[in-house]
Each structure stands twice: as C-alpha cells, then as structure tokens.
Image (cartoon, helix red, strand yellow):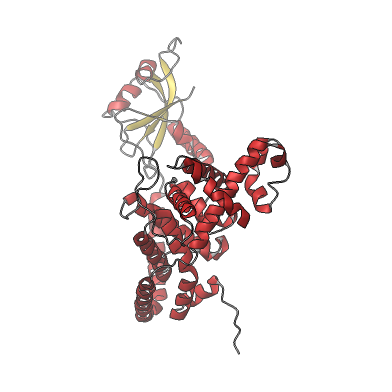
Amino acid sequence: MPSASPESDDELLLRIRGGDEQAFAQLYRKRQGMIYRFALHMSGSGALAEDVTQEVFLALIRGSCGYDPERGELSNYLFGIARKLVLRHMERGRADVALESEDGLPAQAPELAVQPVDLTRQETIELLRRAVLSLPSRYREVVVLCDLEELDYADAALAIGCAIGTVRSRLHRARALLLEKLNRGRRPATAVDALKPARCQI
Amino acid sequence: MNCQEFWNEMPELARDGEAERGHAQECEDCAARLERHRALAAGLRRIGRESAEVAAPPRVEAGLLAEFRAHAGLAAHRRPETRRFPLLAWMSAAAAVVALVALVARDHRPAPVQRSVPSSSRAAGALVAQAEAEEPVQAAMERTAAAEDETGEAIEDFIPLPYATSVTPTDDLNVVRMQVQRSAVLALGLSAGADEDSESVLADVLLGPDGMARAIRLVE
C-alpha cells in the first residue's frame, strides 16, 4: 500500500515540471485558496482575485516564476507573486477595486460572505472589513498576511520581500490605524465596544 | 518596563499571552489600549475564520488545467528540437570565442605615439598654443596608462572640455603632458593659481583617436 503522507510543494513542483497534470491539480487545490483570499482581502474584488489566482498559477505552468527552493517555501513565493500582481492591477486601476469614500472607508462593501450573527456585531465586523480595505497597501498586506491568513512574521517578510522588523512595525501601525478608523466610524460608541465581547473567545 | 517599551514588545507579548502580566497591570492607560487591541485582533481573526473556506471558482481550475495540457503538449513537441540544441550551441559558442579573440587582438595593437596636437582642434587650440612638451610624450603616456591600470579611476580626474566629443570606454586615447597657457585654463573655469608669476601651467591633456583634445587634468 502506498504511503499516504502528502507530498511537499517542492516534490509536487518537480512532478509538474515533468508534465504531471495530477501534481499540478494537487498543488493548485492545496494553495489556490490562500492566494485567492489574499487577493480578495487586498482588493475587495472577486474578479481581480480570480485573475490574480489564474496568473499566479499560469506563471507556475510556464516556469516563469523563477522560484528558488533555497530562498524560501513555495507558498511564500506564490504570495509574493500574488502581491505584485495585485499591486500592479490596483495601480493600473483595471480592477473594480473598492473606491474610498470621503471618510477614508471604501464606498463598496467587499464580497466576502459573512456568517449571520447579531446585527450589531455583523455591522462592526463589516466596518472592520471595510477599514482593512481602506488601509494603505503596505499596511493592508501585513494585516491580511499576519492577521487574516495567520502567517508568522518571517513568512510574511519573505512574501513581501522585507525585513521581519518591517513587518512587525507595519503591523503595529496598521492596527493603530484600524482602531482610529473604527473610532471615526458613524457609531463611534459602538464600533470598538461591539468587538469587546470577542475577548471572551481568546 | 515603561509604556514605550511595553508597546515596542507588544506583538510578541500578545502572542505569548504575557501582555496582561507586568506593565499592563500597573498602567491603566496601557491596559485599556491593550484591551482595544485585543478586541481588534479578535475581530480580524473572525474575518479570517469566516473567509477560511473562500476559494477561487471552479472555472479557474478548469482553465488552468487546459492551459497545463496545452503547455505540456507544446513541450513534448519541442523535445526533438531541443536534442539538437547542444551541438548548435557549441558551434555558436566556438564561433563567438574566435570572433572575440580576433577583436581583442585587434584592439590591443600598439597605440600610435602622438608627438603633437592637431592645430585644427578648437578646444585644444586654445590649450596647446605656446605649449611645449616638458618630458618625452611616450614616457608620459606610459606613466599615465600604468596609473590608470592601477587605479582604474584615473580618467575620472580629467575635466571634460566644453564642446568636445565625449569619451567612450572603447576609444583609443592618448595623454600628453604639456605647458598650457594659464589664461586658457582660467577661461575653462579651473583654478590655476591666478596669482602666480608663471604664464603657463603643467597639465595632462587627453586626446581622442582623432587627435582632438577631449579633457584636461592639471598636474599641480
């Protein structure tokens, strides 16, 4: 009976370079979610996230991504490609990126599904989601990678291509900005307060 | 630990669950701020959890698999051609090496000795008027060339002459040491000791392959 241990990304990549379609499908299913979510959280646009996911894996198929296993894990490298693509798309203004309204929050709600919870909390979470989208990209990406995708600082630093200390300081600044934005929301009294019960879940 | 140090170490403290202990127990402001940060972190984690199952639509995978098949098919068709590549590559490389050797040999032939500067040079004309070579030109050239070899930067000491053609790394250059009229040097905006008695100054003049002066370097 063959071993059931999952293959590493690098092993799958070797098979992919040998033309193994199954290996490609396996790697895609393993890694597409994180890439798609990253692009979605960064842009707030499902269409852009779909484009970016496709382009990241096309680069893998064409062997044009220049991945070097000695410089880090494939997943971080894929995040790095996705990040560049997202920033490029956003700079070009090609995608339906949520535009910021005058209060610094995006005018359009992101497309992520929200579980039905009590209205106050859902509103607050929605406000927080919009606040994340309205952060400058250098702060948004560390929040998405470290807080939403739960990467550690070292992996986030590899994906972004900066020092760990930079990730750490940007994250600190990003959280302060988010708190400011939440407090500037239309219901300043409820914005952060509504998040407080979440402490009990820690 | 003061407030600043506490917040400097916060991400690690929060992750290790050490944040409530120590400074936050003593400082109400930091304790309140910490609570807000914890609420924020919980909210962010919740967004992360809610979107954990979000994935690209199946059409993306279908499109990529089709692209993979097409790419793999193309690669298979190209294989017979790639087998011939090493021979062609070696032949091309050998031809390139022969051409390079010929080029290098041509470029390293002895440079002609410049005993005088053509009078047609506008820039040089002003500089070399009444100039007299103070030492054998060949000796000056050899010395300058040796200095350039040693430092690789000697040419940077030269000041380009106005309206002169710029020098490129492949130019066959010559350097002539000569006495240059002090007034001509001053006219170029160079400091040539205007208060000194002598009417000329000692300078190295860089000549291009056409014998025209391109740049000047004052010796003293």
Name above or below for residue B131 compared with residue A141.
Answer: above
Residue B212 quadrant? top left
- Position above or below: B52 against B209: below
Q: Quadrant of the C terminus of chain A?
A: bottom right
Q: Disc count in the image? A: 0
Position above or below: A55 against A181: below
Q: Position of residue A66 (x, y in %)?
A: 46, 63
Where B99 sits versus B6, above or below?
A: below
- Name the spot of residue A27 as percent of width and height, x first: 48, 73
Among the 4 quarters of the image, the one containing residue B102: bottom left
On the question of residue A73 being in view, the answer is yes
The residue nearer to you, when weighing A91 against A74, is: A91
Q: Residue at x 45, y 34 (%)?
A: B156
Residue nearer the viewer, A5 or B84: A5
Residue drawn at point x = 55 percent, y = 65 percent? A69
> In the rendered image, which quarter is residue A24 located in?
bottom left
**Looking at the picture, how far across and down is residue A95, in whole percent?**
32, 55
Q: Quadrant of the N terminus of chain A?
A: bottom right
Viewer-side residue, B67 vs B79: B67
User: Which residue is situated farthest in the left direction here?
Assistant: B120
**In the picture provided, is B11 more to the left or to the right than B164?**
right
Residue A58: x %, y % from top left: 39, 68
Q: Residue at horizontal 32%, vertical 55%?
A: A96
Residue farthest toward the bottom in the current orientation of the protein = A1
> What residue is drawn where x is 41% and y is 17%?
B200
Asked whether the viewer can see residue A20, the reply is no
